[in-house]
Amino acid sequence: MIYFNSRDPGYKSPFGAVRSGSSVSFSLSVRRSVTVSGVSIRLRFECTGETSEHVMSWSGLSLGMDRYSCEISLPEYCGICWYSFAMTASDGCVLFYGDNEDGLGGEGAMYGKDPKEYQLSVYEASANAPKWFGEGITYHIFPDRFCRKGLTQGMEGRTLHDNWDDCPEFRRDENGEVKNCDFFGGNIRGILSKLDYLRSLNVTTIYLSPIFRAYSNHRYDTGDYHEIDPMFGTNAEFEELCEKARKLCMRVILDGVFNHTGYDSRYFNALGRYDSVGAYQSKDSPYFPWFEFEKWPDKYSSWWGIYTLPQVSEMDESYRRFIFGEEDSVVRRWLRAGASGWRLDVADELPDEFISELNSAAQDVLDDAVIIGEVWEDASNKISYDVRRRYILRCGLHGVMNYPLRNSVIEFLLGGPSGHFIAVMESIRENYPEAVFMSSMNIIGTHDTPRILTILGCDKEDFALDKQAKALMRLPEGRREAAKRLLMLGSFIQFCFPGSPCVYYGDEAGMEGFEDPLNRKGFPWGGEDGDLLSWYRKISRLRAESPALSGGSIEYIPACEDILAFRRECPGQSVTVAVNRCNEARCVWLPFDSSFVTERVTGRIFQILEGGLHLSLPPLSCALFS
């Protein structure tokens, strides 16, 4: 009766997010049998509270449907503009049309009142992103567990495992705490010794979890932002790593933990182990304004209530100068030392203004520095602490960790319909500025989630086991082989999707493990899964050699719910991707405009008849045509 599709350029143009101050065209189709006396579109600019209503004029008739259209010039605005449609019927009754109940965009629905509004993301005209990150391949290293080479320094108060293959300590102490003070000694020298290995995976970006001096093995409790943790190496060795990586066409980005510091740090200094006057020791400390004390010194704000992670006030002027404002500030100093960007820990908990100013400082040092945010949801409409975040619409984050992709890949591999994968991913593409979408860090495993192989091979009962049982558990051979085949499909999607595929160290080697710290074991050098490693090398090469996969557009191809198919295109190249996650063969029609196509995974050549290929995909298989 009434039709609109936010992703159809015939109904909304341009596609997706739009620049502030630009124009947007809307059209709505109404079946002629429905007599209406007026059609309008209603806009609500969330950040300013302003609303407007625009009359849509009759613009033609097609297939028995009247078409109503209008073009709207947007004001200088940055944020979400919500919109819906209103139609006045001949009897005076008002009908409404809005987004579908899932709120994912695309085709909408009729409402008698209170329509679910569509989202239109409006971003600053100056917002952009360096292309090198999204076009490349990222490798995420958890520094203590990747590779150990040479002597280990700075062991005060810490335990070093002699056996690299030990299980990380997960048991609670007499106070009920897991101290995270057991170390395996992974260091910069170890990474340097494996740069050729990373190049064999066609890695272009090395993302390091925190490397600054800290008490814990994860180092998210920063002790000194200006010093590399002595167990990991020296400042000079870090500069050497960046220099040698660049010679191999790789860049290094760092983990910026700026929402909190360590309880045992130069700035808080609760244990008195630093030669500074910390906020815990004196209200006259230069660091005292950084922290929020309810009752000094023992009652203070901390990240998620964890007392070892005292939270900072990011808008304190002296703290901002320290992190990014001064010439020798943290952000500027490490970019000058050779880093090419920052991944911001818990970006949702950093004020938008803080992120924007950090971005500006980074660009001041390195004009193609990249800023990636840790965000677990759709970053365009995230609400954190009752505030709608605009960090991807302003000059803030260039990209985010793509957890929606991770969740959608896992859901599809474990039986979810491909249509739902497409709906979620198209919603993300529609809501993000194009540059942000193309600069996402596409993950399927991280240091904060169970290993992807474990997720794909275990059932609910396994995840309900206690920690001791989880630490001992390994997938039986049959289940491991089945999980490996699913992982091959999942990584294939990851490497063919827009944005930078990010491999969590060891996933390519077949590492297993439940939640932290069981997902942070030592890399199994010499014991890698050869099948998986060969597969990752193959798909990383296919990605690296294809301009369409590195930076092309994406368009989905209709298929049954067991098959995910899409096309990536750029000037001069088109590639077609198809994945069958089912245990049985499935057929799909793939359109082509050439006489022959090559399937790049197997090397087979197919003749094209009648404009396309009726492809029978074997069970648990994938194909890449160019």
Image (tube, rainbow, N blue to C red):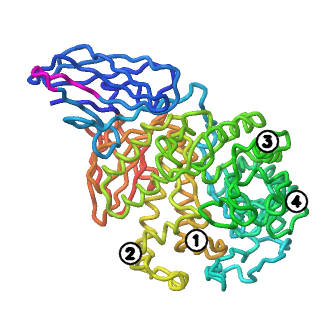
Q: Which residues are magenta?
A: 85-93
Q: CA distance from mark 1 to mark 3?
A: 34 Å
Label 3 SS: helix
Helix, strand or loop at mark 4: loop
Residue identifier under label 3: 321
**Quadrant where the C terminus lies?**
top left
Q: State the residue position of label 2.
A: 460
Asked if residue 353 is positioned above or below residue 511 in the image, the reply reads above
Q: Nearer the viewer, mark 1 or mark 3?
A: 3
Q: Of callouts 4 and 2, which one flags the residue occurring earlier in the amino acid sequence?
A: 4
Amino acid found under the numbered disc labelled 3: Arg
Residue topped by disc 4: 277
Q: Residues within 10 Å of mark 1 (few under 14, many from 20)?
A: some
The residue closer to the viewer here, 173 or 268, is 268
Amino acid tagged 1 = Asp
Q: Nearer the viewer, mark 2 or mark 3?
A: 3
Res 516 label: 1
Q: Secondary structure at mark 2?
A: helix
